[in-house]
Each structure stands twice: as structure tokens, then as C-alpha cells.
Amino acid sequence: MDIDWAALGQVFGVSLLATVALVGVFTLGIVSGSARRTDGTVPVLARTGAYAAYAACAAAVAFGIYTIAA
């Protein structure tokens, strides 16, 4: 049994990069969603950015599930 170490390294690298990117985008969503003005309201642009970040995370997860299931 031979192990293709180069392919294994590529899979590890892409998985690590995708994980860090997905966690980073989700963190941006959390930070954007928690931005408050002095009166306690969330600015519309920040809320829209948070929703966009969450949608990007959901799309990435859906794509991953689709890729695995296909």
C-alpha cells in the first residue's frame, strides 16, 4: 500500500486554509452583528455585512456537503 504524500499534503493544506477562512468570515459576522451605536441600535450596513458573512458561511457548508454527497 502506497501513500501519496503530496496529495495528502495538498488535502491538508486546502482543508486548513478553508477552515481558517470560514472561521474568519464567521468571526467577521459576529463582530459586525455586535457593532452598536451609542443608542444601542445596530447600523444597517453592519447588520447587512453580518448577514452576508453568515450567508457566505452557509454557502460554504452547503457546498462542502454537496461535494461530499455527490
Image (cartoon, grey):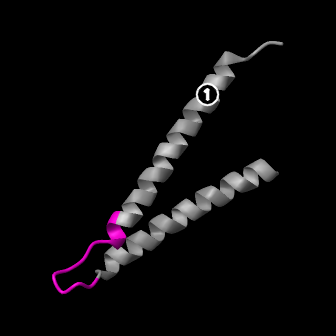
Residue 48 lies, in percent from the top left, at 40, 76
Q: In the visual, does 60 lie left or right of 35?
A: right
Residue at 52 percent across and 45 percent down: it is: 19
Q: Magenta includes 25?
A: no
Q: Which residue lies furthest to the left in this view?
A: 38
Residue position for label 1: 10
Q: In the visual, does 56 lie left or right of 32?
A: right
Image quarter for residue 50?
bottom left
Residue 35 lies, in percent from the top left, at 27, 72
Residue at 26 percent across and 85 percent down: it is: 41
Q: In the visual, does 32 lie left or right of 62?
A: left
Residue 10 lies, in percent from the top left, at 61, 27
Q: Magenta includes 40?
A: yes
Residue at 44 percent across and 56 percent down: it is: 25
Image quarter for residue 37?
bottom left
Name which residue type carries label 1: Gln
Task: Specify start and end residues of the magenta stretch as a single range.
Answer: 31-41
